Amino acid sequence: MDASNYRRVPLGVVAPRDADDIAATLAVCRDHAIPVVPRGGGTSIAGQATGTGIVLDLTRHMNHVLDLDPTTRTARVQPGTVLDRLQEAAAPHGLRFGPDPSTHSRCTLGGMIGNNSCGTHSVAWGTTADNVHTLTVIDSTGRTAHLGRHGTGAPDGLLDLVTGELALLRTGFPDLPRRISGYALDALLPERGTDVARAYCGTEGTWGILTEAEIRLVETPPARALAVLGYPDESAAADAAAGLLPHRPLTVEGMAADLVPTPTALPRGGAWLFVETGGTTPAEARAHADTIVRAADVTDALVVTDPAAQRALWRLREDASGTATRIPAATGPAGEAWPGWEDCAVPPARLGAYLRDFRALLADHHLRGTPYGHFGDGCIHVRIDFDLLTTPGIARFRRFSQDVAHLVVSHGGSLSGEHGDGQARAELLPAMYGPDLVHLFERAKDLWDPHHLLNPGILVRPHRLDENLRFAPLPHHPVDVTFGYPADGGDFTAAVRRCVGVAKCRTTTPPGHDVMCPSYRATGDDTHSTRGRARLLHEMLAGEIITDGWRSTEVRDALDLCLSCKGCRSDCPVGVDMATYKAEFLHHHYAGRRRPRSHYTLGRLPGWLAAVTRTRTTRIVNTLAAVPPAAALAKHLAGIAPDRTIPRLAPQTFTQWWTERLRDRARTHGQPGHTTPPPAPHTPDDLTPSPAAPTSDDLTPDPASAGPPPAPAGPTSDGPAPAPAGPTSDGPAPAPADPAGSTVLLWPDTFTEHLTPSVGRAAVHVLEAAGLTVLLPPRTTPRHGPVADGTTRGPLHPRHLLPHPTRRTCCGLTYISTGQLDHARTVLRHTLDLIEPQLAIDGLPVVVLEPSCAATLRTDLPELLPDDPRAHRLATAVVTFAEALERHAPHWTPPRLDRPVAGQTHCHQHAVLGADAEQRLRAAAGLTGPLSGGCCGLAGNFGFEKGHEDVSTACAEEQLLPAVRAAAPDAVILTDGYSCRTQLAHHSDRTGRHLAEVLAEALRTRARDTGSGTP
């Protein structure tokens, strides 16, 4: 599959290292009459990168910029070169390649030449064909040809064919900037220089296999501005686009509100034009943009000069090819939308009229779609909610395609304006060109490919547009799964169908702070990309190639290097969630079978650590882990990589510290002269142990009585004093009716509890310094009334908080990541039973310090227990440490550190939780500088498991470790995730800390300096 609706199973894939490999492959295929399909990034949306013979993967080895000459402004590249790599090589010289599709981070120059790609800047710099100088190709006969002007490289008979059909070639092609459909045989006319290289562009691998290209570069404007123009609707924007072209903008891109999840950053309107301008200085670029705003008849406008803000806005446009595949529904999950009529083009002056007619045609066929695209060139992209799963739906898809082809031609347009015809539109070319010119295309193809090996069924003598559809072999009944998949109507097959192949996961350098897909960047193997894994799951469900279903070793091996970082959940434009799919697969794959050793050890880590604490064997475990032979044996038995160091357990858990702290306060209450009330009332109904006489050394105290120290009467340097009505450790326990107020529930996750309790202690100090009362979850279920049904309610009573030394809340993260979903649901139900009384308190936030645990509670919990309303309440209540301070202590001012920072935003934080609150808190504390993106590579159990060492280290070396090495000596190294801190400790001499630890230390320093005591 590529990024289209089509699927064809090849005999095999060849990754050639050079032109000789390509020639050898063609020779074998010629001898056996096997078709050959050249493939770049696989982002073609018309099916031309799929085939039943041999697929040439040109991205693996033939991916280099061979030469770049700033003087002549040319570059020589191999066909598998990714566009962004060329742009990076050209940028130091002030140059770039003009065409830039939205897939620039993964599309290849060979693919761009094969499809004659264009991109957002085509109004300024034209199509790929406009920027090609010479090409080197090998045709199906084995002939190597160097294509250029004046007929250079043409096969025998091609120029004679042109000479004999001059009249047809001069009159048969519409004159518009984005005519991509068919063969550009008019480029062979004498008055156009008989340019064979230009004619080759857009042939979609049907004339020859490209081995090298010499291309032209253009100057990059030193400064740019972006004018965002608001219009009432897309037709009004389209009507205005052509009128802006005389001002010579760099782009005129259009999109409507349907594709913008949160249009708050955009000016008022229902549709927008993104008009980029250039200049030698920022002032000149801004003045150019202001001129365009004045010339445009707009509802509202915005001019953006900040490069970061421009990138954020351009990302909205670039992600549209994925975003458009999910059409919002009035209720329930979003509807699916597909390519199939993706990128026609009409004369720019006709675009508004065409869009109105197009909308009417959609309505006539009872279809929906959201047009967007290159309005300045009259080129429109659209994904339409075709029903490609049923026979009537496929028939309607065919009828609509035929009708819209005639509509485009009636407006003087081209069936393809950017991505080629492929299988999706080639059958319709007679409507645009007529039978005589289509027959001429066939004659030209036969001269280039007399053996009929090169991408047969594409462009000429095409397959039908409604055959080879990739959905046909998928099951038509629901698949029995464990997660709820609410965004896909509970249908796992629909979840897998989300992957439309736009391949953003195949970027070798993630844009900005994106995470997806770290294992692909580490291996360079498409199998280990999000798309590759999704397509293997597709084949597993189809059952034609992968026939053993959930037991498939191919799918298991592809998922093995998935770090479950959840980066794809946010970075994939269509929201593929491979971490969830992996957990689902592992659950079924190992059902009733022996699992890897690491699943029983690392996957059940919370239980093992709790057992160590209960048996008071922490010191023994730490001692054995420090003895090399014992540690080696333990790692072998546990499935842990030999080079990993077994983490030391904390001698005192977080809740043990909490208990000891409560005892100290209880003793203070009993001292002579101490007049404040005890921490909690003691009545016959109160079964909470007396603070003066705790009953166990491993006892979670009554959380209601464990708040901050008494607040000062007036304002302090920490900010205004907390409201006197708020509960404190010296006052009575909070009543259920006083829900959130200044009270937060701190979640003692497994990592904080057993491995880094310093993070929990620091968080308590900071939250209390901010005037918040900190509670801990209870460790026993309420004794009155059923609770497991998730609906019955009883009053919050002190006895509900009676501790139990063997029971704790747990998010189930390690069970989920290893696919032990039945166990995870048991743990989560128990957690909900324990925490149900707190969930009854409206507005009580649950502060989770470990980002991976917070993400699990936010997403996996409600998806594993979709029918339990308590799960949704807990997921909604979860906040991060910074969110708790921002929302519930808004007037508190953190201490100023005024130091640079380095480190990494946790991948789950980026993907699920968001890091805006953390950024604002760092800024308020004077912690300056960005954190890196990506994934640390340890990723919970992943980096500890044997066999994952190289990939784990490669992920860390991508962003985290270089950022830390480059950090100033006085920089604060921030890594809120336990995995990130551990990975850093294993590969660096710098120590990462949680933001709570940094702030707590600053508070203690300030307290010592001011003599105000320890917070």
Image (cartoon, rainbow, N blue to C red):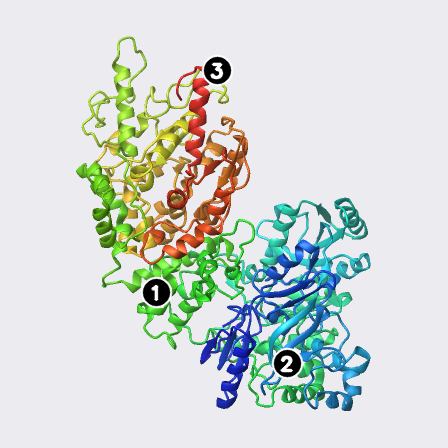
| Residue indicated by mark 3 | 714
Residue 930 in the image: state x and y as whole percent: 54, 41
Secondary structure at numbered mark 1: helix
Secondary structure at numbered mark 2: helix
Question: Amino acid type of disc 1?
Answer: Arg
| Residue indicated by mark 1 | 556
Query: Left or right: where does residue 218 sit relative to residue 917?
Result: right
Query: Left or right: where does residue 1004 sit relative to residue 893?
Result: left
Residue 400 in the image: state x and y as whole percent: 60, 75
Of mark 2 and mark 1, the one earlier in the sequence is 2
Of mark 1 and mark 3, the one earlier in the sequence is 1
Question: In this view of the protein, can residue 170 be seen by the observer?
Answer: yes
- Residue drawn at point x = 28 percent, y = 18 percent: 678
Q: Quadrant of the C terminus?
A: top left
Give the spatial CA distance, label 2 vs label 1. 41 Å
Question: Amino acid type of disc 3?
Answer: Gly
- Nearer the observer, 587 or 744: 587
Circle 3 Cα neighbour tier, 10 Å, few/some/many (<14 / 14–19 / ≥20): few
| Residue indicated by mark 2 | 428
